[in-house]
Image (cartoon, helix red, strand yellow):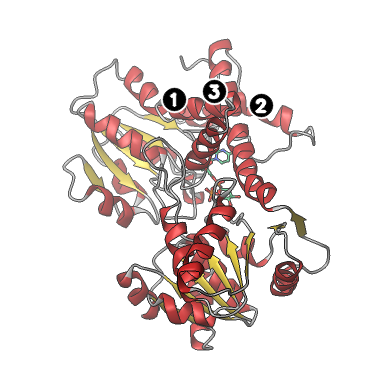
Amino acid sequence: MRITIFGTGYVGLVTGTCLAEVGNDVICVDVDAAKVARLNDGEIPIFEPGLDELVRDNRAAGRLHFTTAAEPAIAHGQMVFIAVGTPPDEDGSADLSHVLTVARSIGQHITRYTVVVNKSTVPVGTADRVRAAISAELLIRGLDVPFDVVSNPEFLKEGDAVKDCLRPDRIILGADSARAIEAIKALYAPFNRNHERLVLMDVRSAELTKYAANAMLATKISFMNEMANIAEHVGADIELVRIGIGSDPRIGYSFIYPGAGYGGSCFPKDVQALERTARAHGYNARVLSAVEAVNVDQKDKLFVLIERHFGGDLAGKTIALWGLAFKPNTDDMREAPSRRLLEQLWAAGAKVRAYDPEARHEAARLYGEHAGLLLCEHPHDALEHADALVIVTEWKEFWSPDFERIKATLKSPVIFDGRNIYEPRTVEAAGIAYYGIGRGRSL
Ligand code: UGA
């Protein structure tokens, strides 16, 4: 099939590449000319395991193209995907201006039946607005070109994006047209083998499904962070509690890891946006407000522990930070807990020596030549002249460190483990003070 994808961010680039991989002829459009030029030079703007090879192979096979030119791209596509960003506006609602710009452009250029697929995470009711924007442009052109708008939200995770896209656990399709449903079914047939993964529903339910999934996962995390805080007050170990409750299949082991708060481009933004959508429709979503409030506080957690350990005086201290990305296997620092911690440490007069396997260039882009930040090439370089070590992201390479070396290098050996990757007793046996999240009385 001939496919056009607007937006070459995580969702657009991965979706376009995976659709090309199964034989479709894909054109990806982006307004960012520099990004398109890089992609055409074979340079992938994000770190995502497996994506480089896939983009390279499909470009070489002539099935994957990148352009800034909307008009010929719209003429190319039997299906046009909208996968552009929906950043939060000032009040936390999703800003739909990019989505609607693409919709208008589609209305200005389509000449034959087209299926328009909303892939971006968009508030309930957006498909109607996209439909209206396309119709308005067709009216101006005096044309009556048939088209359908469907909702097909994306559920890929950064770091596992290619796998999630090639082997989805479900394909959510919100549609009200038999013609569009048949076209989408045919497109996804290669990804829908062994058992039926396509869940068909109305458009609004599909739009809400996307938010409900992320809000549920964020709720699990905030709930566990709250349990961890209670564990500290009552002198219990949240890691034992986690295993104790996860064995109940109704609860499950996944997404119940307490930590330094959830980050990334999705959970913080989507929880807020859904809460704003509910409010705009006259409903006060109290659980969502609490999920967000707990997460905002949790991002202060490591700083509070560090400040308390050093008697409230961090001036002149040097803190080693392991992990800058919002989670392992990505270089993404959007809403990362490390960012709040860096800013709080600097405001308190401390300096930071930081190591991350992939996100150093992103930190350099965000903070430039900041006097309070030294980006290190090796985890042990970060420990030099440092007073304390803080684990912010649980990259695999941090899990079995040389504690003797850490003890010998740090000025006052102490580890603040924001992801509970160490056993307190093991660290303490090595002569290093230990603070985790919810691991007994650290208050
Ligand atoms: C999330 C969802 O998991 C995807 O299903 C969804 O498609 C995506 O958002 C999206 O809407 O595009 P992602 O943001 O890539 O994916 O990252 P997650 O793996 O979900 O992690 C989010 C945050 O939660 C990270 O900061 C992570 O450290 C934190 N987390 C996760 C915890 O603190 N505890 C946990 O138990 C799990």
Using the image, tell me which numbered label, if any, was put on residue 376: none
Up the image or down, 441 lies above or below 117; here it is: above
Q: Of marks 3 and 2, which one's residue comes earlier in the chain?
A: 2
Determine the residue positioned at 69% across, 64% down: 167
* Extreme-front residue of the structure: 142
Q: CA distance from mark 1 to mark 2?
A: 23 Å
Helix, strand or loop under label 1: helix
Determine the residue positioned at 31% across, 57% down: 361
Using the image, tell me which numbered label, if any, was put on residue 297: 1
- Counting from the top left corner in percent of width and height, residue 342 is at 30, 36
Comparing 304 with 138, the one in front is 138
Residue 25 lies left or right of residue 67; in this view the side is right
Q: Residue 253's image quarter?
A: top right
Tag nearer the camera, 3 or 1: 1
Residue 150 lies left or right of residue 304; in this view the side is right
Q: Of marks 1 and 2, which one's residue comes earlier in the chain?
A: 2
Three-letter amino acid code at the position of disc 2: Leu
- Counting from the top left corner in percent of width and height, residue 86 is at 45, 51
Helix, strand or loop under label 2: helix
Q: Residue 309's image quarter?
A: top left
Q: Of marks 3 and 1, which one's residue comes earlier in the chain?
A: 1
Q: Which residue is mark 2?
A: 240
Helix, strand or loop under label 3: loop
